[in-house]
Amino acid sequence: MQERLLKTLLDAIEKREAVALVTVTAGDGVYGQAVGKNAVIWPEPERRLLGELGLGDQLKIVMRDARLAIARKRHQHYHYEEETGRFSVFVEVQARPPHLIIAGAGHIAIPLASIAKTCDFLVTVIDDRPQYAHESRFPSADRVVAGPFRPTLVKLRQDKEAFDSDTYIVLVTRGHQHDIDCLLEVLDDPVAYLGMIGSQRRIRAVFELLEKEQMIPASKFDRVKAPIGIDIGAITPAEIAVCIMAEIICILREGPLPGLSEQIQQDRIERRNRAKERLTDLRSKRTQTGR
């Protein structure tokens, strides 16, 4: 059975599936014989566990709590006390590896892909220039794709699982129009992170232009990390890659550091609030005049 559990865990890594190995670490009363038993549990309720825990009627509660630990992507030690005895289980979570998609294979992408792989990310690099999107430039990347940016993103979404809460997207193409095309393609995807390179003034101008020409609600841009990264005074491509990866890890680990984008986001929110207040005042004056 242990070999079967190990093979299942290895298969889950290969398939990028989230699973948990649940082990009974302590028990007394009727649960004394369960100590040392373990099983693999998946996050989907319809999937049965693999293995045996020997917990009887308490198994459903343990499976519920194990799935909560998988959702939180954190190991958890649970303790239970029942009339028939006490027991503890350790839930060792094997989370899906986060997937970093780098749109743009230029000078920043090279160190970024390397750092991300060192941090155990699955890394995909895309660019419309075959001489740049080449495996020899990105030996650590899991996938390097040469093709037009927006169609390539569409194909990635179709070939792999949907862009979701384990997906991190960085837009660092050679031209801002390419960044914008990519942004329009993935803006509505529920990804964990969406960052775009650029100065505050340029980013603000781009967002305002898209609001007017594409009729995109301003609030949609609040989730875009732009300017990208955490302010560490980065200058070189490698340093910029570090500041980008720092922000990504901060999002992944729910860290406290603010990113470069937060000030511009706050400015946009404050401008929208002022615009709403002016509109409310105008409507109020019109109502009073009508009276």
Image (spheres, helix red, strand yellow):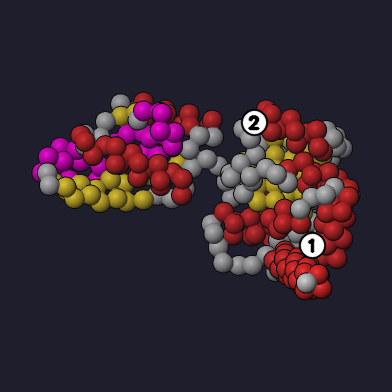
Amino acid type of disc 1? Thr
Indicate whether 258 appears above or below 193: below
Q: Residue at x 63, y 45 (%)?
A: 190
Number of numbered discs = 2
Please say whether residue 28 is one of the residues in the magenta stretch: yes
Q: Is residue 123 visible?
A: no
Horizontal and vertical percent position of residue 279 = 78, 67
The segment highlighted magenta reads 19-48
Camera-side residue: 46 or 246? 46
**Residue indicated by mark 2:** 160
Identify the mark nearer the N-term, 1 or 2. 2
Q: Residue at x 69, y 29 (%)?
A: 158
Indicate whether 42 appears above or below 236: above
Q: Residue at x 62, y 32 (%)?
A: 161
Amino acid type of disc 2? Lys
Camera-side residue: 133 or 150? 150
Looking at the image, residue 122 sits to the left or right of residue 96; the answer is right
Camera-side residue: 272 or 136? 272
**Please, which residue is most extreme toward the front here?**
291
Looking at the image, residue 178 sits to the left or right of residue 90; the answer is right
Considering the image in quadrants, where does the C terminus appear?
bottom right
Please say whether residue 131 is one of the residues in the magenta stretch: no
Horizontal and vertical percent position of residue 223 = 68, 55
**Residue indicated by mark 1:** 236
Q: Quadrant of residue 267?
A: bottom right
Horizontal and vertical percent position of residue 154 = 75, 33
Q: Residues within 10 Å of mark 1 (few under 14, many from 20)?
A: few
Indicate whether 88 appears above or below 231: above
User: Alpha-carbon distance for marks 1 and 2?
Assistant: 33 Å
Q: Is residue 203 visible?
A: yes
